[in-house]
Amino acid sequence: MKEILSIKGLHKIYNGGTHALKGINLSVNEGEFLILLGLSGSGKSTLLRCINRLIEPSSGEISFAGKNVIRAKGTELRHIRRRIGMIFQQFNLIKNLSVLTNVLTGRLGYISFSQSLFLGANQEDKEKALKNLKRVGLLEFQKKKVMNLSGGQQQRVAIARALMQEPNLILADEPVASLDPATADSVMKYLGDLNKNDNITVICSLHFLSLARKYGTRVIALKDGKIVFDGKPAEIDEKKFKEIYGEEAEEVEIR
């Protein structure tokens, strides 16, 4: 299998002194569905945001598709970021704009500032947006304002937006944390389909081990900024689960 992401000796120390990542070493291959597990504050979100430099690492190396992410600037960094889709817990959509316009914003990394003023004028981009809305089952909602959609629907809009980037890698930061169990499973199914059918590598942070077992091909568990487990989802038994989350933790099933 071909490596798509390499992280070596990654540290992140915030201005207040919090040492969020402590020497992370990680190699991810093309086509993996990697789940990040760990308590809130364990470093999951920081790790995801360092990969595309939404957060600046303090030290270490990150390589994506052979490109040095840490040293990249300007146009080179823009080119790297447009091949890395990002899906957020709170969706990060423009609520008073239409579903279609929100999806089209996924092309901003490919167009100039002047072209961005006429977002949607490009017929090819519009056709791609409609195709991606169809993939996530929202084609009939294209003219609706995002504010009028449910949480699950908004997260599917975010997935369609990420697809507009034609990504090799999707980073999903607790994408189902604010959703009910049934909706959470349906959103994970869309990510799973993209992973299997499009061979898009996915790195997704979660709190639910049942979803990790159902959709993940590999699990990384973080604790206090360090990797404490790297293996198959099925290898996490009750003992290992309590090592990651604490002795008082109880596993919650989502089916």
Image: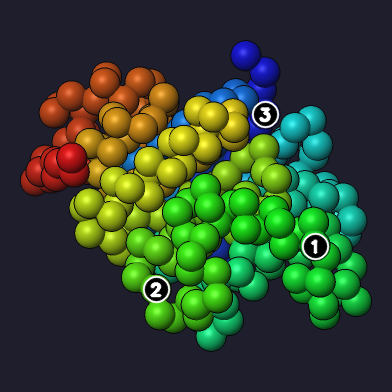
Within 10 Å of the Cα at label 1, are there few (<14), some (14-19), or many (20+) other Cα atoms? Answer: few
Q: Residue at x 58, y 81 (%)?
A: 97
Whether residue 35 appears in this view of the structure is yes
> Which marked residue is nearer to the observer: mark 2 or mark 3?
2
Please tell me whether mark 3 sits on a helix, a strand or a loop: strand
Could you say which disc has been placed on residue 149 in the image?
2
- The quadrant the N terminus occupies is top right
Q: Residue at x 89, y 56 (%)?
A: 75
Horizontally, is 121 left or right of 13 in the view?
right
Q: Residue at x 48, y 69 (%)?
A: 141
Q: CA distance from mark 2 to mark 3?
A: 35 Å
> Which marked residue is nearer to the observer: mark 1 or mark 3?
1
> Which marked residue is nearer to the observer: mark 1 or mark 2?
1
Q: Earlier in the sequence, mark 2 or mark 3?
A: 3
Q: CA distance from mark 1 to mark 2?
A: 25 Å
Residue that mark 1 sits on = 123
Q: Does the CB distance between marks 2 and 3 fall below 8 Å?
A: no
Please tell me whether mark 1 sits on a helix, a strand or a loop: helix
Vertical side of 125 occupied by 219: above or below? above
- Residue farthest bottom in this picture: 96
Q: Measuring from the top left, give residue 72's x and y in whole percent.
A: 83, 49
Could you say which disc has been placed on residue 4 in the image?
3
* Viewer-nearest residue: 28 or 117: 117
Q: Earlier in the sequence, mark 1 or mark 3?
A: 3
Q: Does the CB distance between marks 1 and 3 fall below 8 Å?
A: no
